[in-house]
Amino acid sequence: MMTMNIDNSIFKTLHKNEAWMYTNVSALSNVDFSTTTEVDFTEIKKYDIAQDNPFVVFVNGAFQEGYSRLEEGISINSDTVGDIGSRSDSLIPRGDSDTVTITGNQNKTVHILQIITGDTPASCFGNVLVHAAQDESISLAETHIAVTDQNHVFMPCTEVVAEQKSNVTIVRSIRGSKEAYHLGSLHVTQHESSTVQTHTITLGGKRVRNEVYAYLDGEHCESNFDGMYMLGKDQLVDNHLRVEHNEPNGNSREFYKGVLDENARSVFTGRIYVKEDAHQTDAKQTNQNILLSDDADVSARPQLEIYADDVLCTHGATTGEIDEEAMLYLRTRGIPKDAARTLLIYAFLNESLDELTDDSFRSVLVEELLSNLPGGEFIRALYL
Amino acid sequence: MTTPLLEITNLHANIEGKEILKGVNLTVMPGEVHSIMGPNGSGKSTLASVIAGHEAYEVTDGSIRFNGIDLLELEADQRACAGVFLAFQYPVEIPGVSTKFFLKAAVNAIRKYRGEEELDAMDFLDMVEEKAESVSLSIDLLDRNVNEGFSGGEKKRAEVFQMAMLDPLLGVLDETDSGLDIDALKIVAEGVNKLRSKKRGFIVITHYQRLLDFIVPDFVHVLKDGVIVKSGDKSLALELEEKGYAGIESCGSACSCS
């Protein structure tokens, strides 16, 4: 088995940086990632949810050819399209690991499965390069799942180049053990009239950092960066975005929403940067949170950095409890209090999942959401 | 003697410390339609909310008996299960919840409470089609989220449709006519009239006599400053239309309504 041997001292002081001030992962600096354990490969089959689609499997960071289905345009460890990641100020360690490159038209969603497993803590990178040439369309669904309760750490990095009029959709889901660390990044470069959507769904993990860096380098780019999270005891998610409008007439949306129970915490930092002369930029960022407990905590930091004068940029953050009027309405129809509450939480979160076009992937996420949701059984009986 | 469907005695209710209802008495027998009229701020909607179990209102005195039980002991959802239905003046939009699933949850919660078997998907859809037709409601609306993107008329028809689905003993209609044009008003009224029966009672809250041309009440009450100041038959509504609320004099001490 291949397990990455990383210099984990970097984790010790990460939270001393302003961009990491709410997210302390220093515990990782004491973890020994060097030992390897036997891996149970029978797990993989369970996560192969769309047998007609391309499937790329990594276990503890190593590509698993025997379990994967590569199709035209998907290759492993081939030449790269350029290092977009280095444009960002991301502090997440990068590593040479097996890399999957996706090119051409991929209208059947390419499923990427990254499993971390084993009885000792494992660390893995997981590099994905997506290159959509002119007019091409690529859809990608990533599952990052820790199947054992260890201080595992994922550091996946997906880089996207969307050329003229191309269309790229990426869904990244963080699932499984609530002990694992996930420090992931997405780096997106867009050219003229391209469309990119990303959805980052956080249901598992102990400390989850989701970075998105997007560079709108051409005119008329359309960009949607969405996120959803449902967290409970001792979990933290830190969604950290920087969207750079470098050319005029770009539209970007950041829309992140989540529900926090017990002492869960959410951090949202959304920086929109509009370069001089990037006129007619329309950029919006929104972060909505529902708190189910007095111990849950939210830090929302919407940030605008604008150097052009003819732009429309807005931001908004709401944090609240469940809508009492909606609760009353449901209850006057006979729905008991707990069920009404569950229904409203599910509705709030499911709005994000409804956006996902890949049915098999969406239903897996709905299932995982329901199993995390107190009273999820009631919804399952109603909908499924 | 028949048990009253609803018996409100000396009801006092506050919201945020402000007294709104100051001793309301009202008895509704099965099969009766009572209209409550009154100027803005007289407490009409508060009365509806208190009957439905809105937790923001505090009942400080008096009682409400419903079908022989103490209604004030029950939570809002239990009241619905026991047979109280409130058609909202402003039906609440609920993003992310489809009308169909919402109704299925409601119908089955109520059936469960009443000891009836829950409906399966097929029986539920049959019932939906039948009841939707009774208020000319397009089935397509049911795939939308609860009240989201509904026109004013659609919202009110959807309320009456929900009432038909939930089959209550008491329907409380809180200004169901507000914001409706005459055609929509007729459809809503027809929907309500189809639900009139010997067992079911209605409280129809309205500002205007117009609705009562279509839903003809057995009794009309005037609520003013938190008390019922006058009761009569449907001719009282016409009198109100003519003279306005200012022109209404309280009943004498012999009247049972105060």
Image (cartoon, grey):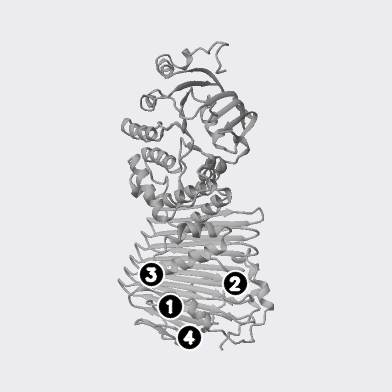
- 1 vs 4, front mark: 4
- 1 vs 2, front mark: 2
- Secondary structure state at the residue bearing disc 2: loop
The amino acid sitting under disc 3 is Val
How far apart are labels 1 and 2 at the CA level? Answer: 26 Å
> Could you say which disc has been placed on residue A168 in the image?
3
- 3 vs 4, front mark: 4
How far apart are labels 1 and 3 at the CA level? Answer: 12 Å
The residue singled out by tag 1 in the image is A129
The residue singled out by tag 4 in the image is A64
- Secondary structure state at the residue bearing disc 4: loop
The quarter in which the C terminus of chain B is drawn is: top right
- Secondary structure state at the residue bearing disc 1: strand
Q: Chain of mark 1?
A: A
- Judging depth in this view, the residue of B233 and A71 nearest the camera is B233
Instruction: Tell me whether circle 2 and circle 3 mark residues in contact (CB < 8 Å).
Output: no
x, y percentage for residue B206?
44, 27
Q: Is residue A180 above or below residue A300?
A: below
x, y percentage for residue B46?
54, 31
Whichever of callouts 1 and 4 sits on the residue coming sooner in the sequence is: 4
The residue singled out by tag 2 in the image is A177
Whichever of callouts 3 and 4 sits on the residue coming sooner in the sequence is: 4
Q: Chain of mark 2?
A: A
